[in-house]
Image: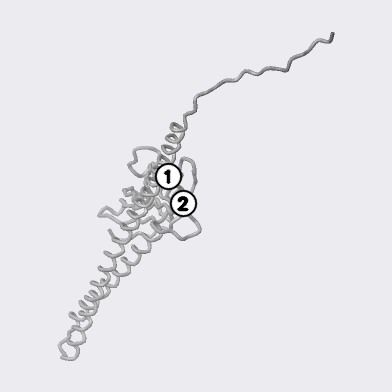
Amino acid sequence: MAAVKGSKQFKMVVSRSRPGLQFTMTILALVTVGIVGVASHHYGKETGLALKVAVVRERASLQEQLLDSAAVIKRLRQEKADLKLGEAVDSRANEEVRLAVESLQQDIADLKEEVRFYKSVLMPNVEEKGLRIERFDVKATADPRKIRYHLLLTQVVDKHEYIQGAVEMQLVGKRNNEEVRISFNDVAELEGKSIRFRFRYFQNIDGEFTLPDDFIPVEIMVVANSTGRNSRRLERRFDWQLSEG
C-alpha cells in the first residue's frame, strides 16, 4: 500500500490590529513637519526683514541729510545773489560763502560715498565677492615722523556670516636710494606679529606707527588672510598719500 503524504502545515500568528495608534502617529508626524516648516519660514522671514529695515533706515537717514545740505546750499547761493544785486559783497564775504558751498558739496559727496559703501556691503551685486581690503589711509600728526593709519576691511557676500583672520602690513620705500621693506611689527606697537580681525559686514582698524628717520615711504602693502571653510589670501598695495590729521 502506498504511503499517503500529507500537505505542509503553516503556523498562523494572530496579531492585534491597532488602527487608532497608527492614525495618531501619522497625525503627530504631519503636525511636527508643519510646525518645523512654519518656524523655519518665520525665522528666515524675520532675519531678512531685520536686515532690510536696517538698510532702509540708513538710506532714509542719509537721504534726509542730503536734502538738508542741498537746502543750505540753495539758501547760501540765494544770499550770495542778493548781496551781489545790492552791491554789498566784499571779497571776504564772497570767499566765506564759496568755502561754505564747497564744504557742503564735499559733505554731499561723502554721504553719497557712504551710501554706495553700505549698498555694496549689505546689498551686493558685484561679481567679486568675499573678503575685501577696501581702503587704507595715512594721516599726519603733530610729530612729523609719527603717522596715524586707518584700514577698512569689508565682506561682500549674499549671506553674511562672521569672517575672521589676520592682517599683515609692510612699508615699502627707499633708504639710500635702495628699495626697503619694513614690517609694521618694527614701527608700530602691535600685540602680535599680525592684526586679528573678526566681523560680519566690515571692520575698521586704526593705529599709529613711526617712520624711521632715514626712510622715504612710497607705498603700503596690506596682506589679509582669512581662516575657516572659505579661507583666502588677499594682497593690495596703496600709494603713499599723506593727508592732514
Please state which amino acid type lies under the numbered disc 1. Answer: Glu
Where is residue 196 drawn, in percent x and y? 38, 42
**Looking at the figure, which quarter contains the N terminus?**
top right
Q: Between residue 110 and residue 180, name the one nearer to us.
A: 110
Q: Mark 1 highlights which residue?
A: 168
Q: Which residue lies furthest to the top in this view?
A: 1
Q: Between residue 201 and residue 87, name the one nearer to us.
A: 201
Q: Nearer the viewer, mark 2 or mark 1?
A: 2
Q: Which residue lies furthest to the right in this view?
A: 1
**Looking at the figure, which quarter contains the C terminus?**
bottom left
Q: Could you say whether the residue bearing mark 2 is in a helix, strand or loop?
A: strand
Q: Label 1 crowding class (10 Å Cα cut-off): few <14, some 14-19, many 20+?
A: some
Where is residue 63 drawn, in percent x and y? 29, 68
Q: In this view, does 95 lie above or below 126?
A: below
Q: Could you say whether the residue bearing mark 1 is in a helix, strand or loop?
A: strand
Where is residue 7 drawn, in percent x and y? 73, 17
Q: Between residue 97 and residue 212, name the one nearer to us.
A: 97
Marked residue nearer the N-terminal end (2 or 1):
2
Q: Is residue 3 above or below residue 236?
A: above
Question: Would you say residue 175 is visible in this rendering?
Answer: no
Q: Residue at x 41, y 37 (%)?
A: 28
Q: Mark 2 highlights which residue?
A: 130
Where is residue 143 drawn, in percent x and y? 27, 52
Residue 79 quadrant:
bottom left
Please state which amino acid type lies under the numbered disc 2. Answer: Gly
Colour basis: one colour
Q: Residue at x 34, y 49 (%)?
A: 205
Question: Would you say residue 15 is visible in this rendering?
Answer: yes
